[in-house]
Image (cartoon, grey):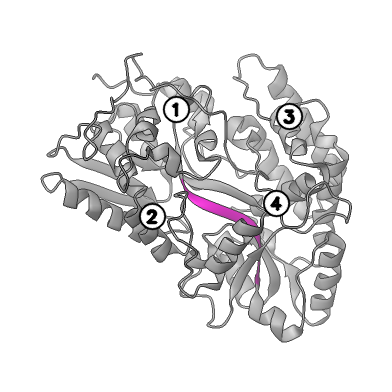
Amino acid sequence: MTPRPLSRRHLLRTGLLTVPAAGLLTACGSNGSSTGTDPDGNAAVQVSDDADNPFGVDAAADLDVVIFDGGYGSEYADFHQQLYSAKFPEATVDGSAIQELTQTLQPRFVSGDVPDVIDNSGANRLEMTALIAENQLASLQPLLDAPSIDDPDTPVRDLLIPGVIEEGTFGSDVYALNYVATVYGVWYSRSLFEEKGWEYPRTWDEMLDLCREARSEGIYGWTYGGTNAADYLGRVIMHLAAKNGGVEALARIDNLEPEAWRQDSVLAALEAVYRLNAEDLMLPGSDGLEHTQAQTEWVLGEALFYASGSWIENEMAGITPDGFDMVVAPVPNLTDDDQLDFSAIQVSAGEQFIVPAHADNVPGALEYLRIMLSTEGAQKFSELTGAPTVVRGALDGASDGSTALASINEAMENASETRLYYQYANWYPDLREVSGPQLGNLLTGRVTPEEFADAMQEAADRVAADDSIEKFTRE
């Protein structure tokens, strides 16, 4: 197949030549059922009856894998690549781990020399909507239809926890495999709370009361990485709004509805987090910290709480003091009369794997993803990172002594609602470019909650009125 590189004009227009601004993140769509097509409109990789090699992988074809070197590290990828090499010993597997995906991979898309598999994660990830618009991604429908490695009678799609296919769907096809079952919540030290006799707050008023008490003992309530991860606290805002107003409050934002950012639940959530800075409960200087610096301050006891996902234990390995016993809990409710109860917590599929349509070894890329979804591949990932994957039952309740993983499993089991996700920032880069700076302004008191909401609503209205921007909807 002749490579079809991305045009420089399109890259400039869609932002692939710039670093994406920080925002309030995630992605989703609707489930597709087609077998998928390649960029030329032909049928995608066909799934055969050969359960051992359903994609017809050339055993001697090399495989190029690029992994995001973030909170989960890259050791798990080394293991997955070893599994692939054991199956296809004639093939050379070239694995690399990077952090600046856009800057590193954009020239390869321009030239047509693309990797076979990309872990498209991190703040500087590739823009999915731009890649899809230019027909640069392969459909993953063949992967979903293929027999699973552990049970050939079970297709891969039936291995996945709810929401994975939807979150990897853009328009009518599936272009991403989100591999990690990421729990997003509020992290704290269980041992510190036991020492002080504190209970985790169930409402935001209780949260503020506890932060004030801690402040009197020389401990700040919260910290965050203002230079690159303010969106972690942005997620807290969205969870507060969803708990108070129901998940439909977030759907209205994603669907670009008029006045969505001025809903009562959204304004109340903005005000709640705004109080942390207004009442001197935020660690001073947080706006100038990178996320790992803020996390270091947290594990060293300078702040009680930190908002993050289930990668944090692995990301802080070697820095977290012994006996810290980090655990995750849901974002508290705004009030006692919220629509969702306290146990509601976001469980989303993260760590987005994609296959370039013009890769040299698309069948091998799909097989690599199938190997990742095997019990052996999934269990090893959790063993090395302390985080669960999207493979149903792969852990069977195991925690290996990790307080973090045990609390993740408990939160997932107890959750009355897990759909506290939102996708406006992934669907509409123009909104992310506004939300990032405005969130920083809100957290430092440079804008009020009302001013933040006004700025976001004005940006959303501009996107809604722009017929050149493809629109997405959700329920």
* Residue named by callout 1: 131
Earlier along the polypeptide chain: callout 2 or callout 4?
2
Q: What's the distance in space between the residues labelled 3 and 4, CA to CA?
A: 33 Å
Mark 3 neighbour density, 10 Å: few (under 14) some (14–19) many (20 or more): some
Marks 4 and 1, how far apart at CA: 36 Å
Q: What amino acid does circle 3 point to? A: Ala
Q: Is residue 163 above or below residue 340?
A: above
Please state which amino acid type lies under the numbered disc 4: Ser
Residue contact between numbered discs 3 and 2, judged by CB atoms under 8 Å: no
Q: Secondary structure at mark 4?
A: loop
Question: Which numbered tag is attached to residue 459?
Answer: 3
Amino acid type for the residue under numbered disc 2: Ala
Q: Can residue 391 be seen from the camera position used here?
A: yes
Q: Nearer the viewer, residue 181 or 108?
A: 181
Mark pair 2, 4: CA separation: 25 Å
Residue that badge 4 annotates: 416
Q: Quadrant of residue 151?
A: top left
In the rendered image, which residue does mark 2 sit on? 378
